[in-house]
Image (spheres, helix red, strand yellow):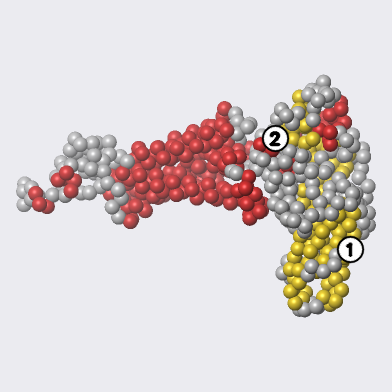
Amino acid sequence: MAGVSTPPERLTDTQQTGPRRHWPRTLAHAAAAGATGLTAAALAVAVGEVTAAFTGPGSAPVIAVGSAAIDLTPTSLKEYAVRSFGTHDKTVLLTGIYTVMALLAVLAGLIAARRPAAGAAVIGLFGGLGVWAAASRPTAAAGDALPSIAAGLVGAAALWWLARLLRAATAPERADLPADPVQVDGSGSGDGTGEDHPFARPSRRTVLVATGATAAVAALGTVGGRRLADSRNDITAARNAVRLPAPAVPAPALPRGVHPAAPGLTTFVTPNADFYRVDTALTLPRIDPRDWSVRIHGMVDHPTVLSFDELLREPLEELDYTLTCVSNEVGGTYASTARWIGAPLPALLRRAGVRSGADQLVGRSRDGMTIGTPLESVLDGRRALLAVAMNGEALPVAHGFPCRSLVPGFYGYTSATKWLVDLEVTRFATFDPYWVKRGWDRTGTVKTASRIEVPAPFARVPAGDVLLAGTAWATHRGIGAVEVRVDGGPWERTDLAADAGPDLWRQWSHTWRGATAGTHRIEVRATDAAGRTQPEARTPPFPSGSTGWHSTVVTIT
């Protein structure tokens, strides 16, 4: 009846105890709360991507956090990632970051269902983490923090708004409240309590539409931001416009017979698309050669700055060279060969006037990577280059365009600075480069290595004569011999392909006569040109490169 109040025993919990905050009451409510967190986080990412289009792709919050994570990751874990995921290690890292972010965003949404401001603060912490990560980069600029600041503020505001809207839509009925007009966002109150349970509350459909619209804006912002960043940083036209002069010192033609006729054997020269890539860059530095220069300074009499055009006017040299990564496992694929063109580095250093006492050359990349090379080795007559071309074209962006360093005889981590912008002549006692700080050997001399490529591991091969083939290298020393053995039997010399020079790998082949049915283990070992044979004992890549004999198992049918 009109005017009759609800009996006390039938009062709602809120009516009996007053306004109180509550966790999501149902699974559907919890799912909606989690969705608000995810949506707000997605919008934060989108805002970060759009802002980073103007401050640089590397300043995007997720990229900044990922780069900082790489720097802080223990060496053993980094090696595990390279060993387990290969060139997909960066994708795995970013996937992990997005997954953790999504889980925390759901948690933020659940918290916001009870306390909107607290949930918004969790999203704000994402932005704070991005600010810290951006500021921690060795090449950090003041503007690099802007994407994370914007992401944190917008994401927090979005979650606060969506959470308040959801609370208003799912609040318990309050039949005792007067019908005061209130705002949908809960800014008004019919009972003077300030509780977010307005009389005129939004429908669940309104909450769904608001969340969906925010998600749509987030998706469009993320895609649009990345495309904007790509367009603003696109250097394809600038790279294609590079006209490489003919080298003053061309490389001799490769001798005939450098590549045995063995189906499945690695090509002698690696196509650019197949050349291995191992680095710490989550986004590739994109440098317009018209804006590029390299500075040579430190312990020199005449500090020098060279533009790209000036570098091309140097008497360029052509070099066939096999580059190897220290992370290569025994039998691994992190070794590739290319024909490079570049300016002779020793001549540039001598022109700058290297001072007495200097013993290290530190290369710095645009993304802040530092790589140190023994200076005496750069100047001992080997053909060290500031490379600008690879296999007849300007360096690919992924391999250091517009310029990278190469010093034969050393792993890439101590000799091959990609996206090079700075060369400092210094001392080992004065400065530890990036990888040396993390426990790696400061010299990085390439160790003798060999691998079996034919037959492939676990291949099934008909009985009879079986062709074995593979590749060996001991850069700047050369390969003197390669031997194989089957099932622990006597070692047999293989047929070495033509020798193209000590700075290149050497391929080999051998006919295994009368292979009989069953499972067999094949091993290989190499001896360098100085007569030193690979040791049998296996060691991991850390801290100075892997060693050991490679083996494979095949089944003869």
The type of residue carrying mark 2 is Pro
Q: Position of residue 380 (x, y in %)?
A: 88, 35
Please identify the quadrant where the C terminus is shown: bottom right
The type of residue carrying mark 1 is Arg
The residue that mark 1 highlights is 493
Residue 351 seen in render: yes
Q: Is residue 76 above or below residue 554?
A: above
The residue that mark 2 highlights is 433
| Real-space CA distance between mark 2 and mark 1, rounded to the nearest whole angstrom | 41 Å
SS at mark 1 in the image:
strand
For mark 1, does the 10 Å Cα neighbourhood hold few (<14), some (14 to 19), or many (20 or more) residues? some
Q: Is residue 225 above or below residue 272?
A: above
Q: Does residue 41 appear to the left or right of 11 in the view shown?
A: right
Q: Does residue 441 appear to the left or right of 319 in the view shown?
A: left
Residue 423 seen in render: no
For image coordinates 75% across by 28% down, the residue present is 427
Q: Residue furthest top?
A: 301
For image coordinates 12% across by 52% down, the residue present is 10
Considering depth in this image, is 512 or 181 the residue closer to the camera?
512
Q: Does residue 200 appear to the left or right of 401 in the view shown?
A: left
Considering depth in this image, is 412 or 447 the residue closer to the camera?
447
In terms of sequence position, does the residue under pointer 2 or pointer 1 come before the other? 2
Considering depth in this image, is 136 or 241 the residue closer to the camera?
136
For image coordinates 71% across by 28% down, the residue present is 430
For image coordinates 63% across by 31% down, the residue present is 139
